[in-house]
Image (cartoon, coloured by chain):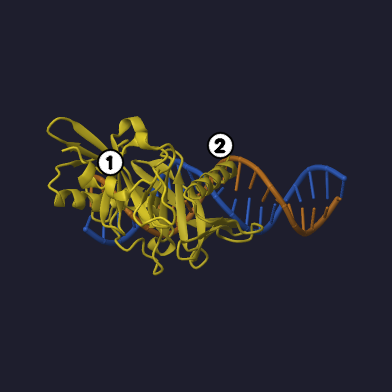
Chain colours: A yellow, B orange, C blue
Amino acid sequence: MKSHERGDATEAAVIAELKRRCLSVSIPFGDNERYDIVVATPDDRLLRVQIKTGWIRDGTIEFHGKSQHTNSTGNTYTNYEGDVDYFVVYVPDLDSMYLIGESEFGTGMQLRVDDPEQSHETIHWAEEYRFEERWPPRPDGSATADDRPTVERVSEYLRQRDVDFARAVTISEYDLLVDTAETVVRLGVETGWVEDGRIRFHPNSSTDRDSIDWFLVYCAETSQAYLVDPDEFDTSISLRVDDPDTEMPSINWAKEYEFENRWPH
DNA sequence: GCCACGTCCTTACACATCCG
DNA sequence: CGGATGTGTAAGGACGTGGC
């Protein structure tokens, strides 16, 4: 694919994904801005976002955090300092999206997806930069109130409940594996949030529902994890935490989906 | 030795301007 | 008018450097 087409395809994929998450996306008129889109946060902040294509190399996701210009004197390179707030890196090979603050790196960055041959303290694990882990970003530029990825928070949640589990160390269809007395349960971890009195989450579009047994949705606002069977909904489901304005028979009460109430063992 | 990071380079394309 | 040249943007490969 030609480079411009690839860039356009990346932009289209990211915008489609943001819209699927019901986020407000604006596209600047003309092509004189250094950011690609403007995204509104739930607290009505407008963030300038530059969309980048990432590619896999040696087990890491690479992308360029600078623009290049050629003139009579040769190549010049300009970073986006002050011109954008965040980068959204989309990796077509993984069909995954990552959110990185402009201040978090210089001219480039690598996000590790595979285990390195030698462990390093400075490794940036791709999992920790996943869009769904970091959205919405805090006003001070850091990712979320609790910077740990949802998988980490869920791990702590399960440990507090004496549930033995194993984490997927490579890109797998499932995130956690729980070996119970009778069977092995595969969990796909998702980040939930409270909106209009309901807990919402966007299941990862790349997740093969046949390869997991439960979606384990962790909501920081309620400090609670919820189990949702992949067969219980088609494209989305919301779990009611507050009383609705009008009582309806089809309400999915969050209480009934709480981990303790559904965990089979 | 392995890693993240920075720099340089090539390739590709779009568009504006210059000049014969 | 149309080809040549310059400018600008982007993808992505290669390699050097310094830290751990």
Residue found 53% across the figure and 56% down from its top: A24
Tag 2 and tag 1 share a subunit? yes
**The quadrant where residue A75 appears:** bottom right
Name the subunit of mark 1.
Answer: A
Residue found 58% across the figure and 45% down from its top: A8
Residue found 36% across the figure and 57% down from its top: A242
Q: Quadrant of the C terminus of chain A?
A: top left
Nearer the observer: mark 2 or 1; the answer is 1
- Residue A175 is marked as 1
- For label 2, the SS is loop
Q: Quadrant of the N terminus of chain A?
A: top right
- Residue A5 drawn at (x, y percent): 59, 42
- Residue A213 drawn at (x, y percent): 28, 34
Viewer-proximal residue, A60 or A26?
A: A26
Viewer-proximal residue, C11 or A37?
A: A37
**In the shown orientation, is residue A182 left or right of residue A229?**
left
Q: Residues within 10 Å of mark 1 (few under 14, many from 20)?
A: many
Q: In the rendered structure, which amino acid carries the disc numbered 2?
A: Met
Q: Residues within 10 Å of mark 2 (few under 14, many from 20)?
A: few
Q: In the rendered structure, which amino acid carries the disc numbered 1?
A: Asp
Viewer-proximal residue, C18 or A108?
A: A108
**In the shown orientation, is residue A7 left or right of residue A140?**
right
Which residue is tagged 2?
Answer: A1
- For label 1, the SS is loop
